[in-house]
Amino acid sequence: MTNLALMKIAGYLYDNNISFELLIDPNQSIDKYDYIYMSKVFTFTPYPSLYTEAGEARNKFIIGGTGN
């Protein structure tokens, strides 16, 4: 589920004609992406497997939120 911060980032990208997409499938390849924005609201929420199994590609993730 998306949250307000991610929706604002999506709005900025849309307004500036920068392509973006919502990643839902945890098994999706992240090779084609330059950045992946992720937000956590609660500290007890686990990180998704898309992040935990990224290995060296974790540097593509920009993570924010109060639960980070």
Image (cartoon, helix red, strand yellow):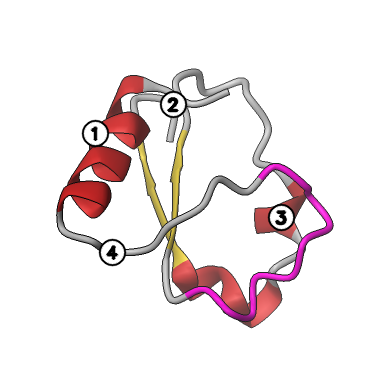
- Residues at discs 2 and 3 in contact (Cβ within 8 Å): no
Q: Position of residue 48 (x, y in %)?
A: 70, 43
Q: CA distance from mark 4 to mark 3?
A: 22 Å
Q: Earlier in the sequence, mark 4 or mark 3?
A: 4
Q: Quadrant of residue 18?
A: bottom left
Say the numbered circle drawn on residue 18.
4
- Magenta-colored stretch includes residue 36: no
Q: Inspect the image, locate mark 3, and give the three-letter code of the amino acid beneath it.
A: Leu
User: What residue is disc 3 on?
Assistant: 50
Residue drawn at 43 percent across, 57 percent down: 20
Circle 3 SS class: helix
- Magenta-colored stretch includes residue 27: yes
Residue drawn at 26 percent across, 49 percent down: 14
Circle 2 SS class: loop
Q: Position of residue 67 (x, y in %)?
A: 44, 26
Q: Inspect the image, locate mark 1, and give the three-letter code of the amino acid beneath it.
A: Lys
Q: Residues within 10 Å of mark 2 (few under 14, many from 20)?
A: few
User: What residue is disc 2 on?
Assistant: 67
- Residues at discs 1 and 3 in contact (Cβ within 8 Å): no
Q: Earlier in the sequence, mark 2 or mark 1?
A: 1
Circle 1 SS class: helix
